[in-house]
Each structure stands twice: as structure tokens, then as C-alpha cells.
Image (cartoon, helix red, strand yellow):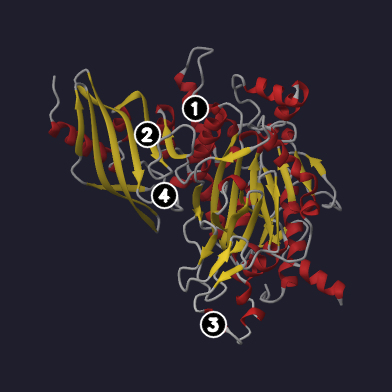
Amino acid sequence: MSVSKDQLIDFIYDETRMLDEGRYTEWLALWLLDGHYWMPLDYKQDDPINQTSLLYEDMFMLKLRVERLNGARTFSQKPKSRGHHVIQRPFVDEMNGDRFVTNTAMHYVETRLDEQQLLALTARHDLTLVEGKLRIANKRVDVLNCDAAFRNIQLLP
Amino acid sequence: MGHYTGNPKAAADLVQINQVHRDVYINQDVYALEMKHVFANAWVFVGHESQTPEKGDYFATQIGNQPVIQVRHKPDDIHVLYNRCPHKGTKIVIDRQGNTGKFFRCPYHAWSFKTDGCLLAIPLKKGYEGTGLEETDSGKGMKAVGAVHNYRGFIFARLAEEGISFEEFFGDSLSSLDNMVDRSPEGRLKVVGPPLRYLHHCNYKMLVENQTDTCHPMVAHESSAGTAVKLYEELNLPEGSPKPPAMEIIAPFMSPYEFFEDMGIRTWPNGHGHTGVNHSIHSNYSDVPDYFDSMSEAYGEEKAKAILDENRHNTVYFPNIMIKGPIQQLRNFIPLAADKTIVESYIYRLVGAPDELTARTAMYNRMINAPTSIVGHDDLEMYERAQEGLHVDGMQWVNVQRLLEEDEDFSEEAVLNGTTERQMRNQFNAWRKFMTFDLEQQEAAE
């Protein structure tokens, strides 16, 4: 089975919508088990392991993050945060057999109570075709002002 | 309470033996006094020498609300200068770090200064001839802070020209910094990457107090650490399979009260202290291959073991930093206003030690200290609720009397039950002392 450029682009749009609608169980199911969600701290950072990142999360951490959002004693989510992406049409940078790379510019808004913040993001998705389905092998989200002092970022930009 | 401006004594009176008045957290005039007296008379952390390794390298930061520059003037000589041109006040550097070459040059009128602050040149200098510029502060160059001390790579400064010496201020509390640096087989640390920067809408003291608050982890972090433990149990992994890294880092926050009682707290004079006298949440980290061997080679087996058996949890250095020796971290709680604090969390590499240790401290930093950290979210929520709650006029005192003893003497080192709030009282005792420090000097002189 082959994958078209449009299918890759639709996948990114669908994933973003899942996040904005809080459909996290579906979202987690998109991931390969050894995938990592990386949000670097440094501009153009190339090492996720040996220096600090904002996020570098394996499936256990991502599940923990999602599970925690609904916890009875998760006080920082009472009331809950809401997130919203506006994304540009993704670039499809690589199409190599079963492996694909996309690059997507996004504006992400997260809000809770009286506060709202806007982040400009570039997301790189490494996608893999497994048994006819596209899955996220890795995702890297670069924040334009990664070196700024941030307030809480509680959801997944 | 009363009016504070120009009256540090009134601010000092906000501290009682078992409670402190809310104005120490929410009143902007008290904040201004803190900056003028506490932060000027104490020794405050500036940066690490590895942030400015070469001649001309600088690092711009703040001591309290004062913008300063740490700059390497000579290979073994680091200076701390106020970040303003003596001419019109323009900040000399704006980027957080860089190299200025042989001199600083103000971008406004091109006054230039050597990297020790001395005035080098002024364009069209004849315009000042006979005006007596050399007798003014402006004519002397960039102003230096009162005193600077490099302790094993960590740069501290005292803004006041005269005052308590570095050795007297820190005393035996330096053993925590020693232990952190000794964990490098070469006795050297190197900063790794930029720090996390996390903005809190609360008073910086809430964050400092939280570092030795051992009765909050199992409550405030139930949402993150408790959920981690639950998820892990649900995984039902066969015995002996490796634990997810999150379990090693986050799960110990759910340790029971007895664990924290038994870990112990030590306090030192001048507001310093640490948790984890006997053990800590860092005690059971897995061994890193080859590390002990390189430590034994450097120090001998016995001393290497003694260094690594020390598991101090959080060491607070009054007034506003915390270090974690076992994982080489430093958190700087920079007070921007009574209700605004920026937290910068640094990690360091142990020179000569395996990379796995750097990976561990990087992991801890992002899991616990980041603006994206679930554990960080738990804490910030509590601080900011307190900052708002303290505006209730019907009740104006904050309680700090857990395990209070009669006639506590903070000028003596003490080791106590790990859930005591003595370290918080110790910090406020030092806060009083340095709030009125120059007042007492003045009175003594009169």
C-alpha cells in the first residue's frame, strides 16, 4: 500500500484536532511504542538526552501526562486548560517507502482561568506506515521563543 | 500593618517565632526593603565560572532586582559589574551571554570600559576638560559590586561594600557545594546548556521554603507521582524488567511521611539548611557503570564511597538558591517583584564522569523543574493559590511552627526530624538579621 501526500497532510490535521478536542486516548493510539515527543529548550538543539529539554517523553510519560489531566486530585487542572492550534498546510519533506517526514508551522493557544498564551511552533513528524496505518514514530516541536521565561504549559503543544 | 518605606525595623517585626505576617509575601514596599537590605548584605549567587570560560566572556543576570554582568577579565579573574553605563544608564549588554573582546563599549555614546569596569575612553573627551568629570561616579567607569567570591567555580557576590565575609556567611554549609563538586573525579563542574526559565506569580520565598517542605510531596504531587505509581502497577511488568525512567525520578515523591521524617533536616547559621541528612529521594538511583571506578581512582575507595554515600536532597543557600548535590542542579529563585519570581534551573556535568550522569540530571530537570513539567504544575498551583489567598484581610499570618522547640538558637547547627519547619524559621531569622544588618552597623558606629 502506498501513501499519498494528501493522506500525510490529512493525518497531521487529524492529529491536531484530536489534541484540541482532548481525544487523548485516540491520540496515544497514533504512536509507535518506542516514540518520543520532544520539545527542545535551546534554539536548534540537537541533543535530547544530555542537555535539558522542555519535554522528551516516552510512552509511559505521555500516558502519565494524559492520565493526570483527569485525576481527581490534579489541582492545576481544576478548572481544566484548553488548547487550540491553527496550522499551516504541512510540508511533506520526505517520502521513503514506509517512512515519511512532515514539517508544520502552527500557532498554539493555551488558556486556563484568566490567562491565555500564544506559542509559535514548528512541528516535525516522523511517520511510519505499519500494517496499513500511519503512526507517529517521533514528534519534535520547536517553540519560536524557546529561550523565554514561560508560565505553565500544561497540555501538549 | 504599618508603613515600611525607609523602615527596615518595621519589616523585621513581621517575623515572629512561630508565624510571619503576610506582608513579607505580598507587600511591594517590603520587597523594596528586601532588595535594599537583605539582597545587598547577603552573599547572592551570580553564575558558574564555566558560563564565562574565556577572557571577555560575559553573562548577564540579576542579583535581586539589580542587573549585573559576570565577566572574565583575566584567565583566573572574574568580575561582577552593574549592567549600566555610568553615563546615561543604558544597559551595556542585553543578550544573556557573549564575548565582548578586550572592552565593553556602550552602544549609545561609545564610552568604553575595560572588562574590570575601568573607564577606557570617551569620544570627544575634550568636552569634559575642566568640568571635573573624574571626580564624579560617572567618570570612574562601570561600577563593580561590593565583593565577589569564586567558590569552587560558583560565583557569589555581595552588593554592599562592607559587611559579612563569605566564610562567615556560609560557614559549614559549604559542605553541600563541596559534595556536589567532589562528585566529579576531577573536582570540576561545567554548566550544560541554558537553564529552564519558569515564571511564577508568587513571592520568591514561597519557592525557597518549599525546598525543605517535606509534608507537601505526597499531597500536592499525588496527581503526578501517585498516578505514575498507579500506571506502573497496571503495566504489571515481569519481575526484573527495567523500570520506566519516570519511576526512578517521580515516584519517590509519593514516599510516606515516615520516610521524610527519618530523612532528617540540618540547619546552619545565616539561613542555610538541607533535607536528606540520612537518606533522600535520590538515594536509590541505579548505579552507573565505571563511575565508581573513576571516583576510586581519583580519591581512593574509602573517600569515593563517602562522597557518593552522601544523599543530601535539597540544600537551601539563603536567600534564594537551592542545590541538589547528588544530581548537580542549582535553582535560582530570582525575585522580580513581591508577587513575581523567575526560576532558573541549571544542570552541570561532572567533568571526568560518564555521560549517563548528565543524562540523568537533564531528565530530572525536564521532568520536575520545567514550565512543561507535571510536577512543576502541581507546585506552581499551590504557590499562586497562596499568593492570592494571602490577600484575605480577616487572617494575616502564615504559620511556620511545625516541630517548634523552645528557645531555638539558629546560630548553632542542628539536625532534626525531617518534617520540622525549622529551616523555614531559620530563613526568616536570617531575613530579619540582614534586613536590619546595616541598621545595626550604623547604631554600632554611633
What is the spatial separation of the Cα atoms under label 2 and label 3, in whole angstroms?
62 Å
Q: Residue at x 59, y 60 (%)?
A: B115
Asked whether, in this view, residue A118 is left or right of residue B36, the answer is left
Asked whether, in this view, residue B178 is left or right of residue B395, the answer is right
> Considering only order in the chain, which callout, 2 or 4, is on the residue closer to the N terminus?
2
Q: Which residue is mark 3?
A: B126
* Chain label for disc 1: B
Could you tell me the amino acid type at mark 2? Tyr
Q: Nearer the viewer, residue B300 or B249?
A: B300
Q: Which residue is mark 1?
A: B230
What is the spatial separation of the Cα atoms under label 3 and label 1, in whole angstroms?
76 Å
Query: Are both tags, 3 and 1, on one chain?
Result: yes
Q: Is residue B79 visible?
A: yes
Q: Which residue is mark 2?
A: A37
CA neighbours of label 2 inside 10 A, class few (<14), some (14 to 19), many (20+): many
Q: Residue at x 38, y 42 (%)?
A: A44
What is the spatial separation of the Cα atoms under label 4 and label 1, in whole angstroms?
23 Å
Query: Residue A79 has which mark?
Result: 4
Tag 2 secondary structure: strand
Could you tell me the amino acid type at mark 1? Lys
- Which quadrant of the structure image shows residue B184? top right
In x, y percent, where is residue B320?
64, 53
Q: Are marks 4 and 2 in contact (CB under 8 Å)?
A: no
- Which quadrant of the structure image shows residue B1? bottom right
Could you tell me the amino acid type at mark 3? Lys
CA neighbours of label 3 inside 10 A, class few (<14), some (14 to 19), many (20+): few
What is the spatial separation of the Cα atoms under label 4 and label 2, in whole angstroms?
25 Å
